[in-house]
Image: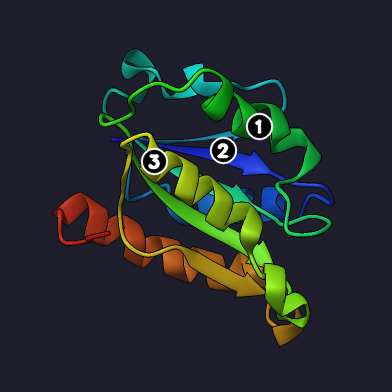
Amino acid sequence: MKLKILVGTMTSTAEYVAQAVQMDCADLVDDVEIELMDALDISVFSADKAKDALYLICTSTYGQGDVPDNARALYDSMSAAPAFLGHVKYGVIALGDRTYLQTFCFGGKKFDERLKDLGAQRVGEVWCHDASSGTMPEEEGTVWCRQWLTDALQGTATA
């Protein structure tokens, strides 16, 4: 099994989380691949690329609850060129700041909604990190991801 982490970020925080997950969870899967969402489109979820893969969307929230600029093309392509993604299994790490309660973690939540609409199968719950909590998203994210991956590999996680 391969873990493919797709990163949407403006300030590199989501990328740091992805790198921490890559280092900490390498013993659980055959390969952990990080890919910035820059220039990606819906084809990243094609059946041949998704074979024996579990996706992890790791994204921050920007502006008024938007996906980061580098994730915009991928997010928009899922509406502009929709395709059935029933073969895709994924999880979501959503980064946000509860100070902005109306749009807390909407970057990740928007990806989750769009993927579910296209038939993709979410594994487990969306994990949300609150930047105003004073905790490090890299530390908490790896703890969450180890449990999420363990459950996913055992087939016990549900959406």
Quadrant of the frame with the C terminus: bottom left
Q: Earlier in the sequence, mark 3 or mark 1?
A: 1
Residue sitting at 23 percent across and 61 percent down?
151
Relative to 40, is 115 on the left or the right? left
Q: From this view, report whether residue 59 is shown above or below residue 72.
A: below
Distance Cα–Cα, label 2 vs label 1: 6 Å
Position of residue 9 measured from the top left corner of the image (x, y, whole percent): 74, 46
User: Which callout, 3 or 1, points to the residue nearer the camera?
Assistant: 3
Distance Cα–Cα, label 3 vs label 2: 18 Å
Element on which disc 1 rests:
loop
Q: Earlier in the sequence, mark 3 or mark 2?
A: 2
Callout 3 environment at 10 Å: few (<14), some (14 to 19), or many (20+)? Answer: some
Q: Which mark identifies residue 37?
A: 1
Callout 1 environment at 10 Å: few (<14), some (14 to 19), or many (20+)? Answer: many
Relative to 24, is 50 on the left or the right? left
Element on which disc 3 rests:
helix
Q: From this view, report whether residue 59 is shown above or below residue 144.
A: above
Callout 2 environment at 10 Å: few (<14), some (14 to 19), or many (20+)? Answer: many
Residue sitting at 55 percent across and 69 percent down?
128
The kind of residue on which mark 3 rests is Asp
Evaluate whether residue 134 shows in this view.
Answer: no
Position of residue 45 measured from the top left corner of the image (x, y, whole percent): 42, 24
Q: Which residue is the site of mark 3?
A: 117
Tag 2 and tag 1, C-beta contact below 8 Å = yes
Q: Which residue is the site of mark 2?
A: 6
Q: How is the image coloured?
A: rainbow
